[in-house]
Image (cartoon, coloured by chain):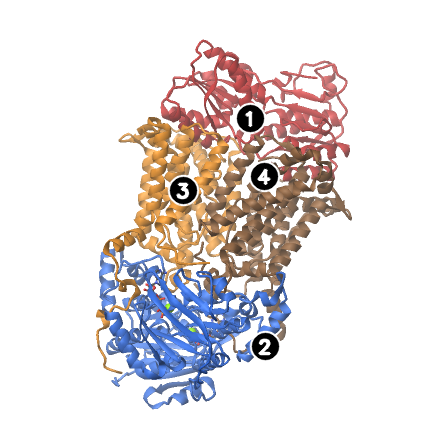
Chain colours: A brown, B red, C blue, D orange
């Protein structure tokens, strides 16, 4: 994984000698190249989907309740995708997010049962996040210091965390009967469920972290050019550990959310969420080779997938047809995004 | 009320009940029923879906909405939310995880929508108007008892078990029931492997199992769908010193039992018509009708389905209700 | 000079233009190449030289322009067609594949194969011949290219061009990764080629090389040919520089200032060694002093810098202003005031997709962030000021670093350490691929830094550059310091003699 | 031009040869750096596993029958991994292999039912392979010419192929009752089942294709340096289509094998095989970023995983414990491999 090469597209460009340009064209180009501009294709794709939804399902789609329902569903994989965005920007991958979520949910529920006496429910949240962070730290240390490829490390963690969850829970689902916790996770503020607020907060925090802090800057630097980051004095290994911990933390937060949503902890929570998260991140325009990515894109990616699921549901489509359509729409979304974001293809063949 | 065996012949529409049958069959107000279940990623679940659909098609007064099958509790919750938003008249729910879907089911009930809970039970009685359960523990007991009967005189007999997906509670329950029944006759499970309810998975683990156990007297395979693979592996290994008991009751398994040509001698029914029953009951509940075969004025709240054993002797009785 | 009767032009280009989304790279270039000549193309970074040759080799399709090949009008549709016509190219960016062997790289795209099945024996045999012809009979055809030094990769690239049946070979800055010995070797090959009537298009920023090998010159400035077919013998260097840059550049190396006798030792290296690369060495650099490391490619100079910087696992100690720094840790080195401008700007130095200011501030977060929160406004302002001071035009901190020319990229690397305020600056090949104009700027800057009290260590493959910049020179061969002398006490041939003897021993 | 003609060949200026070294050390180093050497870590890992197997399960492990059983199981994912090796070396990824296998198995079985009359069973094999090739071609064209990232394209194909299989089969399992076909796929030659022979043949063919043909060398070139390959006159896009077709073909072959092994075609065949295949390829030392890889490594990777599974079964281990152990062993195998293959890590933090 240390073989990070710079994308071959950027070979030898030196337009430093100022070239006269039509100012409007220049402004449009600058916008399209900006992070907002890169996402415009996704926004278009999302709008198209919303139109399709409204046309095919009318008020059932465009109602406040339905929007909340979409967002509630989106919020859990959404939170995971934010952590995943960092990992992928840093040039890594985390296949273990779903099963770490499952493990966190189990440990937190068990703790709740044990600690029912004290009744201080925020401890559940702390425990869920701590379990996630721990799993992330193990991933990070093995990857950064053990130099095992991220794909294998997190695949191993996927197996191990799920299995540990099964052993701990003895494969039974554990109900969460902690009133305070359930009230918190199921409550709402200004009519918007707390689950959605949690996603909003994580997404905003993620955006700030990525774009406004040294942490984010280092993450982009490492993913963009591992060697250059190292030679600029960044402690690359330590930072990679932090990045995987961050991903574990988002899994822990998602575990809290799913506990609230389902009221139960089970080792099967989060199965295959890694695929959903990676897909949202990639559709969102983050490069799988690292070095570039956007939180806004990821959020749009998550929304696109969840609106799609909702439209299928409302239109009562045959499951298999759904899957085929979903496949086609993934391709279409990526194509739309590329058409808008591409700054002119430079290859000929 | 506990009712066993009454659903041995569902879907035929020709029950021989009292005078209420015609009343129940008579077309009433059109009702919208929402159905959500786990991903139809194997034969039994596929059969659950198609039986539900077929059942709904029989009644002109049912408008069935089937949500995409999923193994993700969170997505299933949102499907039920969707049904509530849509104000359907009844919901038939085969939850991917009973406890995890309880809360949203209660929400539906509170919104005045009766919920019919199928196969995997909610953790609260307030979550469902009617509960129809297959009996996973009982399935294991039936299989174990049958094996005991066959091997009872041999306390050293080697018993093997090919389980389904180990992380599912239902697999646990089946295994527990099996072990309990074997204990009664002094046997135990000597070799246990878990597949994944798929044919290829069944084949893969069984070929390994046969290596691990050079001599076997009886095998219980939890699921006839993966059983196709289990039998293929047994075939390939050329082993026939044991007999095998299946599970769920697929057409292929019953054909094999009827033909009595291989090691498969029996299978334990796990009704794949539960959801169809659910649809039927949902219609009755939503239309305010009662169950025709019993004297109750209303539909009962809890029905546990039997898990009978099918052998060469009684296969004729069951074969028409098997799933493909 | 051997003057051949060149006859009709091999290739003629009239009015070639090429625009990349928004950037007009070529605005009208004429070029006429005669068989058997060495035709040099000169121009500043970004003038359009590489774009021109990529058009000739079919990588880009030109927007306009007439092309004649052996008197016939042609269009060059793609790399395959160009190669088919007999135009082979050694590109500026190393275009070899690390995972393949030397022989496989050479025959890539025109494999020796029978219905797809490789005839490796034959390929290896022909590769050995080609390598021998290039003076590198010591390289094995079955060596994986990934394990070769950049210089040897360049050899592979050349062997590949020669493996084709060619009439014209284009070399885009082939000498950038070669040392003087290797360059001589290259020139010998070029002479052989021209003797066979093969034309060579040669691009380099080193005017001395042009003088040595070129027959005629075309100068490109801002995408336009300023002069075509100038005779090397009769065109003076100042004239060429004026054509390229539009200005006069007087002396390339600014005069050194005497180091004060009481200047403190800033960098002290004691018994530094890296197993299998270089033997223990000790030296020190005083404030304001420039120490140059001279030697051949592969002698271990980059490794010495990397070891001082903590980027390469080593034994021994490094002290900055008398305080020992934790070994084998780049962050520790940076924190104690050491900065490194690496050899490969693109792969080791810069984040090409990121804006310039982020490249500038990358090593100085302590200065630009409070509790991890970056003050981008301050970053931009500081970067702009620094870029203006370095005369980067335009000094726009929001431009992507990958869009800058080589010289300007080098300035960004310097800006990074200027903003950080390093006491010790390690410069590895600071002018590789940098044009004459920018070169003079960079030399000036290095001098200014020294004058301001920075201790500087410079590595360069151009001995002239080491001698011109450094106060003190360490001559290195095979990971061993042969001599340590004042630069005034040794000349270019003296250094060469030493290294040749050293590595032969 | 000057007339200097000193042949500089005698002077050794090249880092690759210059340094004097102990000849034994040099020979060992050279071997370790060779492709066989890179795999020695895997061989060691495999030997360790075999020892563990023999110690814990004795003759039940070390019997000819058991070895055949391991190999039979390994052969199906093995064949897929060979195709996957090419895709990954070329710098791509194919997540659709498992579901394309499922689709091929369905179509081939349906064809068998239709064509039962003619009785020419090899047609089933041809159809299965053709379906795989077609799916691969679709992947390849979308990726190479549509420029959609491989991850998304093949993810979409994963969904679409599985769904198509469900629609075609109506989610029912279709038995294969073609005697000739079953005799062929279940037969053996010299006591070794034909399934194993098929894997052996595919692996050898893959090895030759990768190491001894233009196709293989171009695949490495494209993965290693996309731009360089293009500049050398290789039609990169067309070649990528071929590579994905190759992967589809191996899925088709694997479909034939699974049909023989299970005697039934179903849309669930091959579920999650993509993970097994990618894991084997990566453990086998092929870089996920492309440009380098080995068929021998992939085969060793497949064997390691399957021996592991076999040991678990023979020792009657609990599924959850299995999963955790598997996770740990994946990490260990990769670590062992790296220790052997690394040519001395020279970087610091
Ligand atoms: N692929 C491309 N896309 C956009 N702009 C490009 C591309 N390639 C070159 N340019 C621009 O075209 C101009 C000419 O670049 P070119 O690489 O030909 O210069 P050069 O003379 O070879 O410079 P150097 O001496 O640094 O190699 C520059 O302004 C450069 O930014
Ligand atoms: N990755 C590596 N692994 C092992 N040895 C290496 C590696 N890189 C370089 N070396 C060895 O280190 C020595 C010095 O290499 P290098 O080419 O960097 O020297 P240099 O003097 O800096 O040359 P240049 O002028 O190209 O920078 C050589 O003997 C080379 O074989
Ligand atoms: Mg150039
Ligand atoms: Mg160097």
> Residue B20: image x %, image y %?
74, 17
How many neighbours does mark 2 have within 10 angstroms: few (below 14), some (14-19), or many (20 or more)? some
Residue highlighted by disc 4: A102
Residue highlighted by disc 3: D80
> Quarter containing ligand 3?
bottom left
Q: Residue at x 69, y 21 (%)?
A: B302
Residue B312 shows in this picture: no
- Comparing C322 with D130, the one in front is C322
**Is disc 2 in contact with disc 3, using a CB cutoff of under 8 Å?**
no
Residue C350 shows in this picture: yes
Residue highlighted by disc 1: B172
Residue highlighted by disc 2: C385
Q: Residue at x 54, y 44 (%)?
A: A135
Q: Secondary structure at mark 1?
A: helix
Q: Chain of mark 1?
A: B
Q: Quadrant of residue B46?
A: top right
> Residue C413: image x %, image y %?
49, 71
Q: Chain of mark 4?
A: A
Q: Is residue C431 left or right of residue C200?
A: right
Q: Chain of mark 2?
A: C
Q: Secondary structure at mark 4?
A: helix
Q: Confirm or reject: label 4 Cβ below 8 Å from ligand 2.
A: no
Q: What whole-number distance in Å separates the C-alpha atoms at marks 3 and 4?
A: 30 Å
Depth check, mark 1 against mark 3: the one in front is 1
How many neighbours does mark 1 have within 10 angstroms: few (below 14), some (14-19), or many (20 or more)? many
């Amino acid at each position: 994984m240390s073989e990070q090469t710079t994308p071959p597209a950027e070979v030898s460009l030196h337009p430093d000698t100022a070239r006269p340009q039509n100012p409007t064209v220049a402004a449009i180009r600058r916008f399209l190249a900006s992070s907002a501009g890169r996402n415009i294709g996704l926004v278009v794709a999302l709008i198209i989907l919303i139109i399709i939804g409204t046309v095919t399902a009318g008020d059932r789609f465009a109602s406040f309740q339905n929007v909340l329902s979409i967002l509630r569903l989106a919020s859990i994989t959404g939170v995971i995708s934010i952590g995943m965005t960092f990992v992928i920007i840093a040039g890594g991958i985390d296949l273990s997010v779903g099963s770490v979520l499952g493990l966190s949910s189990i440990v937190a529920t068990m703790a709740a049962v044990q600690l029912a006496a004290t009744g201080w429910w925020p401890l559940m949240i702390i425990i869920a996040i701590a379990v996630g962070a721990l799993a992330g730290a193990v991933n990070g240390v093995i990857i950064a210091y053990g130099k095992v490829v991220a794909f294998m490390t997190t695949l191993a963690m996927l197996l191990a965390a799920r299995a540990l969850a099964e052993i701990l829970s003895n494969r039974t689902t554990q109900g969460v009967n902690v009133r305070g916790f359930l009230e918190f996770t199921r409550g709402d503020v200004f009519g918007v469920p707390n689950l959605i607020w949690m996603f909003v907060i994580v997404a905003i925090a993620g955006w700030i972290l990525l774009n406004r802090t040294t942490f984010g800057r280092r993450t982009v630097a490492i993913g963009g050019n591992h060697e250059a980051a190292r030679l600029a004095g960044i402690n690359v290994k330590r930072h990679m550990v932090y990045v995987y911990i961050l991903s574990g933390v988002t899994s822990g937060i998602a575990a809290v959310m799913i506990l609230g949503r389902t009221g139960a902890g089970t080792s099967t929570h989060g199965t295959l969420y890694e695929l959903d998260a990676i897909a949202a991140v990639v559709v969102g325009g983050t490069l799988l080779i690292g070095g570039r990515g956007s939180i806004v894109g990821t959020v749009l990616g998550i929304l696109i997938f969840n609106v799609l699921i909702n439209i299928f549901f409302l239109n009562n489509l045959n499951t298999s047809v759904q899957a085929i359509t979903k496949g086609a729409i993934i391709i279409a979304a990526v194509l739309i995004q590329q058409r808008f974001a591409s700054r002119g293809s430079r290859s000929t063949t | 009320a506990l009712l066993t065996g009454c659903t041995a012949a569902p879907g035929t529409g020709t029950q021989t009940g009292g005078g209420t049958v015609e009343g129940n069959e008579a077309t009433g107000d059109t009702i919208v029923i929402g159905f959500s279940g786990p991903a139809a990623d194997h034969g039994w679940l596929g059969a659950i879906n198609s039986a539900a659909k077929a059942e709904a098609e029989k009644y002109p007064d049912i408008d069935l909405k089937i949500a995409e099958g999923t193994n993700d509790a969170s997505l299933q919750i949102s499907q039920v939310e969707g049904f509530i938003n849509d104000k359907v008249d009844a919901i038939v729910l085969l939850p991917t995880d009973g406890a995890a879907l309880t809360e949203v089911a209660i929400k539906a009930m509170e919104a005045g929508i009766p919920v019919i809970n199928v196969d995997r039970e909610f953790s609260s009685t307030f979550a469902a108007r009617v509960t129809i359960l297959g009996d996973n523990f009982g399935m294991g007991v039936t299989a174990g008892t049958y094996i005991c009967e066959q091997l009872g005189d041999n306390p050293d007999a080697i018993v093997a078990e090919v389980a389904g997906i180990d992380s599912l509670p239902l697999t646990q329950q089946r295994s527990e029931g099996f072990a309990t029944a074997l204990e009664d006759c002094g046997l135990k499970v000597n070799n246990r492997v878990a597949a994944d309810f798929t044919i290829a998975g069944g084949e893969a683990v069984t070929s390994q199992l046969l290596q691990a156990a050079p001599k076997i007297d009886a095998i219980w395979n939890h699921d006839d769908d993966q059983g196709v693979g289990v039998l293929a592996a047994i075939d390939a290994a050329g082993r026939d010193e044991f007999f095998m008991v299946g599970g769920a009751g697929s057409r292929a398994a019953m054909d094999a039992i009827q033909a009595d040509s291989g090691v498969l001698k029996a299978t334990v029914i796990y009704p794949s018509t539960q959801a169809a029953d659910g649809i039927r009951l949902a219609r009755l509940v939503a239309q305010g009708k009662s169950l025709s075969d019993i004297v109750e004025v209303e539909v009962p709240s809890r029905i546990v389905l039997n898990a009978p054993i099918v052998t060469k002797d009684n296969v004729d009785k069951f074969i028409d209700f098997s799933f493909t | 000079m051997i003057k051949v009767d060149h006859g009709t032009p091999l290739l003629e280009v009239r009015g070639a233009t090429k625009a990349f989304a928004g950037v007009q790279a070529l605005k009208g270039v004429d070029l006429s190449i005669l068989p058997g000549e060495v035709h040099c193309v000169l121009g500043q970074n970004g003038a359009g030289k590489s774009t021109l040759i990529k058009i000739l080799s079919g990588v880009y399709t030109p927007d306009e322009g007439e092309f004649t090949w052996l008197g016939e009008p042609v269009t060059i549709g793609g790399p395959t067609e160009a190669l088919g016509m007999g135009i082979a190219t050694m590109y500026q960016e190393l275009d070899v594949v690390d995972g393949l062997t030397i022989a496989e790289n050479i025959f890539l795209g025109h494999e020796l194969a029978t219905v797809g099945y490789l005839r490796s024996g034959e390929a290896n045999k022909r590769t050995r011949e080609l390598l021998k012809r290039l003076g590198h009979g010591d390289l094995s055809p079955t060596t994986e290219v990934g394990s070769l030094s950049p210089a040897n990769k360049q050899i592979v690239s050349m062997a590949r061009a020669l493996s084709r049946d060619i009439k014209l070979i284009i070399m885009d800055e082939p000498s950038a990764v070669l040392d003087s010995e290797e360059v001589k070797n290259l020139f010998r090959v070029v002479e052989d080629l021209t003797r066979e009537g093969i034309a060579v298009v040669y691009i380099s920023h080193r005017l001395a090389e042009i003088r040595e090998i070129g027959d005629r010159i075309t100068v490109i400035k801002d995408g336009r040919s300023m002069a075509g077919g100038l005779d090397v013998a009769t065109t003076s260097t100042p004239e060429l520089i004026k054509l390229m840059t539009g200005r006069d550049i007087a002396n390339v190396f600014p005069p050194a200032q005497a180091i004060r006798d009481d200047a403190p030792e800033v960098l002290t290296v004691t018994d530094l060694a890296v197993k299998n690369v270089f033997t223990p060495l000790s030296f020190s650099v005083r404030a304001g002093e420039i120490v140059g490391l001279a030697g051949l490619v592969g002698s271990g100079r980059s490794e010495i810098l990397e070891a001082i910087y903590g980027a390469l696992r080593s034994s021994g100690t490094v002290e900055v202003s008398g305080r020992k720094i934790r070994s084998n840790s780049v962050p520790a080195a940076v924190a104690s005031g050491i900065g490194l401008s690496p050899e490969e700007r693109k792969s080791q130095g810069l984040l090409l997709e990121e804006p310039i200011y982020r490249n500038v501030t990358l090593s100085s977060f302590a200065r630009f962030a409070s509790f991890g929160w970056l003050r981008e406004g301050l970053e931009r302002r500081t970067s702009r000021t620094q870029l203006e001071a370095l005369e980067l035009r335009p000094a726009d901190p929001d431009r992507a670093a990958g869009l800058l020319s080589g010289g300007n990229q080098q300035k960004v690397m310097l800006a990074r350490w200027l903003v950080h305020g390093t006491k010790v600056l390690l410069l590895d090949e600071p002018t590789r691929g940098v044009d004459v104009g920018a070169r003079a700027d960079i030399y000036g800057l290095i001098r200014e830094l020294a004058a301001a009290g920075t201790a500087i260590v410079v590595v360069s493959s151009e001995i002239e550059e080491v001698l011109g910049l450094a106060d003190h020179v360490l001559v290195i061969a095979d990971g061993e310091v042969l001599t340590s002398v004042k630069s005034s006490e040794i000349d270019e041939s003296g250094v060469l003699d030493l290294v040749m003897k050293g590595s032969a021993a």
